[in-house]
Image (spheres, rainbow, N blue to C red):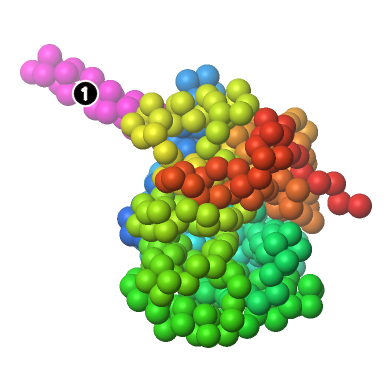
Amino acid sequence: MKFVRNIAFTAVALAVSSLSIAADNIKIGLQGPLTGGSSPMGVSMRDGAKLAVTEINAKGGLLGRKIELVERDDEAKNERGVQIAQELINKEKVVATVGYINSGVALASQRFYQEAKIPVMNNVATASVITKQFADQPENYVFRNSANDTIQSAMIVEEVITRRKYTKVAILADATNYGQLGREDLEKALKAKGITAVAIEKYNIKDVDMTPQLLKAKEAGAQVVITYGIGPELAQIANGMIKLDWKVPMMGSWTLSMGNFIDNAGKNADGATMPQTFIQEPNTPKRKSFIEAYQKAYKVSRIPSPVSAAQGYDSVYLLVAAMKQAGSTEGPKVLNALENLKAPVEGVVTTYNQPFSKADHEAITLNMAVIGKVQDGVVLYAYDEDKKKGGEIRTKAVKK
């Protein structure tokens, strides 16, 4: 009987020890759309973040502990995002979260992190208001390392109006927060150039016929179509233009680089242009190792959403750098470290040198992005001068 009791005691002790080890992991939340039309962005972001965590854990982890990613599929739904945020904070006890692909989900959900004083690093969502949502509060726990829509709108308008000399533009934007906030930024950027769009059309997620919107744009004499939406619907726009035998350039936000736009539109996607923070080319040692690691780990040649993967990877390293500097995972201390990062952080998109301050939670500035172009199923540099300088690290512009 004594022997049996000893075995039972040992088993309980081992179980408790195992639970203690698991609980000792540093939990970082990750949420995004892992299914549905936005999934190329969500899955790529997740897989990029997982690569970063694997690398960091292989080198000893963070503050002597392993990092554990707690991932959740928000399905690009605001209500689901809210539920996940509360679960990650209250049940999983995450010390930070990376993600948010869809701007509407971010704006609905990140308030829970703000209230809990837990940093959230937006690594894909681009609505300009995201990092400003709590800017009027003494502490703002929302950060971003993707190119916001103010940046993208300025690049699109510069490309369309200044470089290509078009004066009649049509805007086709989806009905989500992302599409409509992006449209607003586009209209502001056009107005600054003295241009008013000749047609502004809205469509819904899962719409499969864009003929009514495209006909209005065509009849208005549009010389170029500017889009703000996600892959599947963008493909319907490209395919619809061909059906109407309407051959005008298509340009839009960075999402024209999504795999499900390129695949669903096929050759009709060729020539579409968009702002990009990362082109899948191994033009620096860091990018080469990242691309090769991603391809090996996930058995793909073309990353479904290269921008999302690169920014997902970088977002983890930014948070980890802050926690190392703070010597803690406590929210207020990590916040202070993020706003005052002392050592550069080498990422895929760039080397982040003091990327944030108390007044500025945006890691990306206008000078850091380039124009990409879809050609034969992949996204390339649209201009030779950008390709030639592709190996140069574009760093954050210093505000004067």
Q: Image height check: is 50 above or below 245? A: above
Residue lying furthest right: 400
Q: Looking at the rendering, which quadrant does residue 18 occupy?
A: top left
- What residue is shown at x 70% (from left), y 62% (from top)? 164
Using residue 148 as the reference point, say whether residue 260 is left or right of it: left
Residue 94 visible within the image: no
Q: Is residue 11 magenta?
A: yes
Q: 339 or 8: nearer the eye?
A: 339
Using residue 150 as the reference point, say whether residue 53 is left or right of it: left
- In this figure, which residue is indicated by the disc labeled 1? 11
Residue 253 picture location, percent across and down: 57, 60
Give SS at disc 1.
helix
- What residue is shown at x 17% (from left), y 23% (from top)? 8
Instruction: Give the residue type that dot 1 points to.
Output: Ala
Q: Looking at the rendering, which quadrant does residue 70 occupy?
A: top left
- What residue span does the magenta drawing correspond to? 1-23
Residue 215 picture location, percent across and down: 46, 82
- What residue is shown at x 16% (from left), y 18% (from top)? 7
Residue 171 picture location, percent across and down: 57, 75
Residue lying furthest left: 1
